[in-house]
Image (spheres, rainbow, N blue to C red):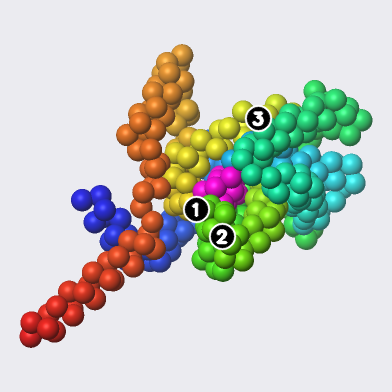
Amino acid sequence: MIRKIFTKIALHQKGILLVLLAAAVVFPLLQPTQYVIRMATLSLVYVVLALGMNLIMGYMGQMSFGHAAFFGIGAYTSAILSTRFGMDCTVTFLAAILLSGLFGFLLGTPVLKLKGYYLTIVTLGFCEIVRMVMLNWVSLTGGPMGIKAIPKFMFFGIKFATTRSYYYIILTICVLVTLLIYRLVNSRYGLAILAIRDDDSAAEAMGVNIVRYKIVTFVISSMIAGLAGAFFAHYISYIDSTYFTSTASQNICVMVILGGLGSLPGTFLGAIVLTLLPELLRGLSEYRMLIYGVIMVVVVLFMPSGLMGKYNFRQLKESWLLKKHEQTERREKNG
């Protein structure tokens, strides 16, 4: 039953995606409360982070706990450039993306040449190093006090200072990142990283430069996290090291796993559910985190592939088309 539903979705996914995008665009115009728009905006920030993480975990099969570090590098870069030098967000966002990518390259180049769980261990350590730098380099980062009064968004001299405009900015970023990952995954590059995920030795034997593809993927993921961090800094107008701990990286990993490794729709679903669920359970006071934990355990036990990891829309569509082709051939033979 569920498979049939997802097959129908796969056959009409372009139309469904356009409807969902239209709904997302119209949503703020329906006069929801400021709180609802803020929660929707925060959910999309985590969607962007989860999309970048899914590129590493879901499509390349590598575990990284350093995502919060790149998130923080992007946030602090944009915040420092805008508060100290008065730079436009067009420049600060670009600087955040490039600096996050640079750190991703410097970290990934030596580590990704090794096999095993070295990336997990190194990125966990890197996340703590970045957090300690944020906490102790007082003259640059503000130390424990963080950076306050971060200016709101300004692109090409145009100011955006409403809750609705923040939502549309992150929605645009989310759509662009999704399109980027979709195009990458459905290209020769995507085939290469999927081959590395399934069997890196076989991929290497077939001539795939696994180190280069791993580094490029890690850098792209780092840049996406840096972009999310730049938006986050200007959105909340204040940042400190507590936002960028290894726990934040673990939460992003859980979002990807819950949604389903290697699933773009699942990434959206996992990030939105895990962002909104604690808020929806807020009325239950001290029991909300217990209920949150129980829900997570139940999902992992009964849906180990995640909410949507079991359903690949492309494979479902191809399977349906093949089945229809076989039925047509049988009718022609019988006729």
Q: Which mark is residue 246?
A: 3
Asked which secondary structure carries label 3, the reply is: helix
Amino acid type at image mark 1 = Asp
- Which residue shows up at 13% across the image and 84% down it? 332
Q: Which mark is residue 203?
A: 2
Q: Which residues are magenta?
A: 49-62
Q: Is residue 117 above or below residue 61?
A: above
Sooner in the amino-acid sequence: mark 1 or mark 2: 1
Q: Is residue 16 visible?
A: no
Q: Mark 1–mark 2 contact, CB under 8 Å?
A: yes
Amino acid type at image mark 2 = Ala
- Residue farthest front in this picture: 205
Asked which secondary structure carries label 2, the reply is: helix
Residue depth check, mark 3 versus mark 1: number of the one nearer the observer? 1
Comparing 244 with 214, the one in front is 214
Q: Give the CA separation, mark 3 to mark 2.
A: 32 Å
Q: Is residue 129 above or below residue 235?
A: above
Q: Which residue is mark 1?
A: 198
